[in-house]
Image: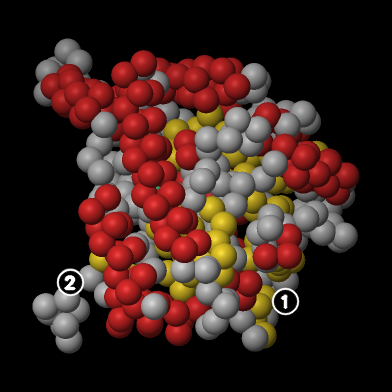
């Protein structure tokens, strides 16, 4: 940017939203702020697990409506899925065997590295991690491994690839977890982008998942809450972990203990804004928001196709994973220098990300259209 002040960059790299909050959320924020200004309606510390009005709305609209049996008190409201999927490993033993996809949202891997769970690093891979490769050969959805793991991180719709898992693929993971006494850590931060009616939105749509899975969700990409901060984690009460002696331990009280010890809840006005998403107007407004980003994603997919580049994602996810057929940093540099467009080099997400870049659909229509024109001209 410093070298080329006359050529402004268009950023399709980081996955941050660009559109403002839905009006229902803004109205709820204003109303809740007014309550905080009156002695009679002021609130101090709230429940660490979240206010019942939000936990109940989540249980009803995100789970019961899809036929999933999740109780309101199995939902823990938080200030972000990043914190939750980073913190969750704290409640497991130091010698837990973790299985982590490659490429991956780096939080899953790095928090286990910081916890000292991953062993030595050689050639960019940790000896203590079971890597789940997502490649063109498996359609970027890793198959269940032939060996056992204790904790398995899964993310669908996926960041960075935008790939989604079918019901059959998720059934295989639930069966794997049940067979190996493993726990699935299922991140569905992008479920609001699913449009294919055959694709599950929640791991709990799979029979038996309540016994083996924790689910993470976020309002960040559903309703533009990246700067507002609200998310939740579901820990079913019947979910058990086994210790070395073969003794069972319920995870719900452990996570509750962890949260009540280290977390003091999400601000009341923010939880009110999140609850507004579940009103009829809120549902329409958030649908319009995700439809808008998916419109950008469609343009990106079509443009890549015209350039002869294979890609996945973008139809049920806001990310497009482009198979560049060359070094991912080289392709990044090409777009940066020739088109002044920023994408994310796939190598940053893991070894299997090499040869790919991620293009994000989070931007204005005008910026996306301009970026695609520039990319087409640069690659001619
Ligand atoms: C897969 C995935 N999980 C979680 C998050 C973080 O969500 P939050 O903003 O709720 O912390 C992101 C954000 O980019 C993400 O891509």
Residue at the disc numbered 2? 8
Rendered residue at 72%/37% (across/down): 167
Q: Position of residue 114 (x, y in %)?
A: 54, 68
Camera sees residue 221: no
User: Is residue 96 or residue 218 the one in the foreground?
Assistant: 218
Decide: few, some or many residues near mark 2? Use Cα within 10 Å; few <14, some 14-19, many ≥20: few
Count of numbered badges drawn on the protein: 2
Q: Is residue 55 shown above or below 357?
A: above
State the SS at label 2: loop
- For residue 105, the mark is none
State the SS at label 1: loop
Q: Is residue 156 shown above or below 107?
A: above
Distance in Å between CA atoms under marks 2 and 1: 43 Å
Rendered residue at 59%/39% (across/down): 215
User: Is residue 55 or residue 336 the one in the foreground?
Assistant: 336
Q: Position of residue 357 (x, y in %)?
A: 48, 70
Camera sees residue 279: yes
User: Is residue 335 or residue 344 the one in the foreground?
Assistant: 335
Q: Is residue 166 shown above or below 67?
A: below
Rendered residue at 29%/70% (across/down): 374
Quadrant of res 274: top left
Residue at the disc numbered 1? 127
Q: Quadrant of the N terminus?
A: bottom left
Quadrant of res 333: bottom left
Q: Quadrant of the C terminus?
A: bottom left
Q: Earlier in the sequence, mark 2 or mark 1?
A: 2
Decide: few, some or many residues near mark 1? Use Cα within 10 Å; few <14, some 14-19, many ≥20: few
Q: Position of residue 195 (x, y in %)?
A: 53, 35
Q: Is residue 19 left or right of residue 46?
A: left
Q: Position of residue 72 (x, y in %)?
A: 53, 21
Camera-side mark, 2 or 1: 2
Q: Is residue 138 shown above or below 51?
A: below
């Amino acid at each position: 940017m410093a070298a080329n002040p006359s050529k402004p960059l268009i950023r399709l790299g980081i996955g941050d939203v660009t559109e403002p909050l839905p009006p229902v959320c803004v109205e709820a924020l204003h109303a809740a702020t007014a309550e905080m200004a009156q002695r009679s309606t002021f609130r101090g510390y709230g429940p660490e697990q979240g206010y019942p009005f939000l936990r109940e709305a989540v249980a009803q609209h995100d789970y019961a409506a899809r036929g999933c049996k999740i109780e309101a008190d199995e939902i823990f409201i938080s200030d972000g899925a990043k914190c939750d999927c980073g913190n969750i490993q704290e409640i497991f033993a130091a010698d837990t065997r973790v299985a982590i996809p490659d490429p991956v949202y780096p939080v899953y891997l790095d928090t286990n590295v910081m916890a000292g769970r991953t062993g030595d690093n050689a050639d960019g891979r940790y000896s203590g991690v079971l890597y789940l490769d997502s490649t063109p050969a498996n359609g970027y959805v890793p198959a269940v491994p032939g060996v056992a793991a204790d904790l398995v991180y899964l993310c669908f719709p996926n960041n960075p690839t935008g790939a989604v898992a079918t019901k059959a693929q998720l059934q295989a993971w639930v069966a794997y977890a049940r067979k190996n006494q493993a726990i699935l850590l299922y991140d569905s931060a992008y479920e609001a982008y699913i449009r294919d009616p055959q694709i599950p939105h929640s791991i709990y749509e799979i029979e038996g998942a309540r016994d083996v899975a924790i689910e993470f969700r976020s309002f960040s990409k559903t309703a533009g809450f990246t700067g507002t901060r609200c998310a939740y984690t579901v820990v079913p009460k019947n979910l058990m972990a086994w210790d070395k002696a073969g003794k069972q331990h319920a995870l719900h009280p452990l996570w509750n203990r962890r949260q009540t010890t280290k977390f003091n809840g999400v601000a009341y006005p923010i939880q009110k804004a999140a609850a507004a998403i579940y009103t009829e107007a809120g549902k329409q407004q958030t649908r319009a928001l995700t439809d808008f980003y998916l419109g950008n994603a469609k343009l990106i997919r079509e443009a890549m196709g015209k350039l002869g580049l294979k890609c996945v994602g973008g139809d049920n996810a806001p990310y497009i994973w482009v198979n560049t057929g060359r070094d991912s940093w080289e392709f990044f540099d090409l777009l940066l220098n020739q088109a002044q467009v920023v994408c994310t080099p796939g190598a940053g997400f893991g070894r299997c990300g090499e040869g790919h870049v991620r293009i994000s659909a989070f931007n204005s229509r005008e910026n996306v259209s301009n970026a695609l024109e520039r990319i087409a001209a640069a690659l001619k």
